[in-house]
Amino acid sequence: MLLKEKVFIVTGASSGIGEEISKQLSFAGSKVVCAARRLDQLERVCEQINNAGGISIPVQADVTALDQCEELVTQTIDAFGHIDALVLNAGISMWARFEEITDLTFFKDLIDVNYLGAVNCVFASLPHLKKTNGKIISCSTGQALMGFPNHSGYSASKHALHGFLSTLAIENKNEITILEAVLGWIRNTELRGNAFGTDGKKHKKPPKQNSKESIDLNQCVDRILLGIKKDRRTVYIPKKLRLIPFFKAFWRWYLEFRAHKVVEKPR
């Protein structure tokens, strides 16, 4: 997919991966609609993009509300006339062993944002994407393919999204394409610092420091954009995550052992 003059909607664009994707898309010549709940941060991102010669607009939207997703699409069509791609990046996480959780209500938040929020965005934009033979890009995780300690609700929400998008790809073959970016731990994002803890409240700081195996934010986004350009169906960041399906099928015990080792590493 060529990026020049293409119209992208990017959710979760106020920080982290969403912000960097929006900036790099604009530098490549795309027109970007930056969506998130924090309007002040969206305006900051779009101001930086536009001052650098790019084209972007901020749209405040909560992906858990279908009417706001529909308004997001309406504003995109009004501004640019069509939609070429939707980047599903809005997401929240957790860091808590299930048996230690004292307030379970945040599990609903995980499903509402990570799964149903993406479904809302797709529902609102799919008719327009089919007109352009467009693309859906999902910023996913290795935890969509396997369980992971301290992330039971997060993993469940990402498994649901993976199943939804896999089905959507079959139902809309030759009309749209779907790229799933299967990510490991990415540095310089707010996801882990804002993760829910055992009491249902967000951590003020990451519960665990980044390991030497974590990936730099810019490097991550570079590889996502390369996957878009080359019309890939899946990109694994880091590449070793592509081994998850193999180990899951033949060496599940080793996969589970490695997951525990990663979590238990000292800070």
Image (tube, rainbow, N blue to C red):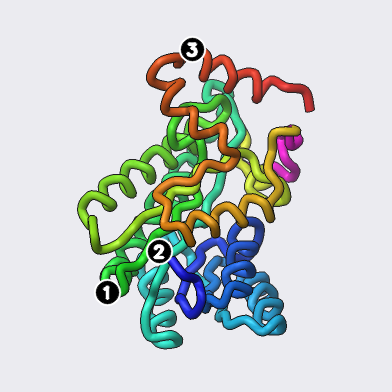
Q: Nearer the viewer, mark 2 or mark 3?
A: 3
**Whole-percent x and y of residue 195?**
62, 42
Question: Tag 2, which secondary structure?
Answer: loop
The answer to whether residue 109 of the structure is visible from this angle is no
* Extreme residue toward the top, this view: 253
| Label 1, residues with CA under 10 Å away: few <14, some 14-19, many ≥20 | few
**Whole-percent x and y of residue 175?**
25, 63
Q: Which residues are magenta?
A: 200-211
- Front residue (pair 98, 243): 243
Instruction: Decide which of tag 1 and tag 3 comes sooner along the chain.
Output: 1
Distance in Å between CA atoms under marks 1 and 3 = 45 Å
Residue 11 marker: none
Instruction: Decide which of tag 2 and tag 3 comes sooner along the chain.
Output: 2
Instruction: Decide which of tag 2 and tag 1 comes sooner along the chain.
Output: 2
Magenta: main secondary structure equals loop
Position of residue 261 relative to residue 226, above or below, is above
Residue receiving disc 1 = 131
Please say whether residue 26 is one of the residues in the magenta stretch.
Answer: no
| Label 2, residues with CA under 10 Å away: few <14, some 14-19, many ≥20 | some
- Front residue (pair 5, 15): 5
* Extreme residue toward the right, this view: 267
The residue at the point 42 percent across, 22 percent down is 248
**Whole-percent x and y of residue 164?**
31, 47
Are dots 2 and 1 in contact, CB under 8 Å?
A: no
The residue at the point 38 percent across, 63 percent down is 135
Residue receiving disc 2 = 65
Residue receiving disc 3 = 253
Asked if residue 124 lies left or right of residue 206, the reply is: left
Residue type, numbered disc 2: Ala
Asked if residue 55 lies left or right of residue 193, the reply is: left
